């Protein structure tokens, strides 16, 4: 497989999984959180399926394509260590779904952040909520699920909140 093939396969798999998650959450109540706005590609896909009103996006800064910037009242800027616990305190009902795409290039910093995310994400989620995470997380309230669409191993981890 060429690098182009593998790049296309990775993005196709991400789109398949997001489409599955959109169908899962479409008729459930509660906000949807996009953690790691980045370029805004996955935010834009979720927005196309669910509408901007439902989605809150988190990042330390706006580096998204201008066509993929959330409305100001749906954009939570700042370090996750501040913005995620702050949001959980303001929205105690919890999100219906979280898409967390926050991998860091530096393996040591990434490993530290994985531990932190494992603590920050569950308080954001309603009971039974769905989490798609690009990192493998560990928390007693996060129940690992089988991945529902064919994607490369360890590309995404799927959890339901106990
Ligand atoms: C892989 S990118 C997200 C890509 C995005 N989902 C897309 O489709 O374009 C990860 C993002 O997470 C943000 N991020 C990572 N760690 C963070 C932290 N501790 N606080 C705030 N933002 C963080 C980075 O700034 C980056 O924009």
Image (tube, helix red, strand yellow):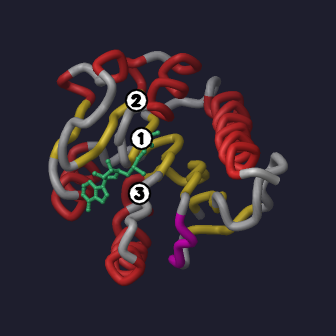
Residue 146 part of the magenta segment? no
What span is in magenta? 135-139
Q: Residues within 10 Å of mark 2 (few under 14, many from 20)?
A: many
Residue drawn at x 58%, y 19% as measured from the top left: 49
Residue drawn at x 66%, y 46% as measured from the top left: 7
Task: Give the residue pinned by disc 3.
Answer: 102
Q: Residues within 10 Å of mark 3 (few under 14, many from 20)?
A: many
Task: Give the residue pinned by disc 2.
Answer: 55
Disc with the residue nearer the chain's start (2 vs 1): 1
Element type at mark 3: loop
Q: Using the image, tell me which numbered label, if any, was put on residue 145.
A: none
Residue 149 left/right relative to 78: right
Residue 24: give x, y in percent of width and height: 69, 35
Residue 150: give x, y in percent of width and height: 84, 50
Element type at mark 2: strand
Q: Does the residue labelled 1 lie within 8 Å of ligand 1?
A: yes
Q: Is mark 3 within 8 Å of ligand 1?
A: yes
Residue 5: give x, y in percent of width and height: 76, 44
Residue at mark 2 to residue at mark 1: CA–CA distance = 7 Å
Task: Give the residue pinned by disc 1.
Answer: 34
Tag in front: 1 or 3: 3
Residue at mark 2 to residue at mark 3: CA–CA distance = 17 Å
Query: Residues at badges 1 and 3 in contact (C-beta under 8 Å)?
Result: no
Residue 89 left/right relative to 105: left
Query: Residues at badges 2 and 1 in contact (C-beta under 8 Å)?
Result: yes
Element type at mark 1: strand
Residue drawn at x 71%, y 37% as measured from the top left: 12
Disc with the residue nearer the chain's start (1 vs 3): 1
Disc with the residue nearer the chain's start (2 vs 3): 2
* On screen, residue 110 above or below 148: below
């Amino acid at each position: 497989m060429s690098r182009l093939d593998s790049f296309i396969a990775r993005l196709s798999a991400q789109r398949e999984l997001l489409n599955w998650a959109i169908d899962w959450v479409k008729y459930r109540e509660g906000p949807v959180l996009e953690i790691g706005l980045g370029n805004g590609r996955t935010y834009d896909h979720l927005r196309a399926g669910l509408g901007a009103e439902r989605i809150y996006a988190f990042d330390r800064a706006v580096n998204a394509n201008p066509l993929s910037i959330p409305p100001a009242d749906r954009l939570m800027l700042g370090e996750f260590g501040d913005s995620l616990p702050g949001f959980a305190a303001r929205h105690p009902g919890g999100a219906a779904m979280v898409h967390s795409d926050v991998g860091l290039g530096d393996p040591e910093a990434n490993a530290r952040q994985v531990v932190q995310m494992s603590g920050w994400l569950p308080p954001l989620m309603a009971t039974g909520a769905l989490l798609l995470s690009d990192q493998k997380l560990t928390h007693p309230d996060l129940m690992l699920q089988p991945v529902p669409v064919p994607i490369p191993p360890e590309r995404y981890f799927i959890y339901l909140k106990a």
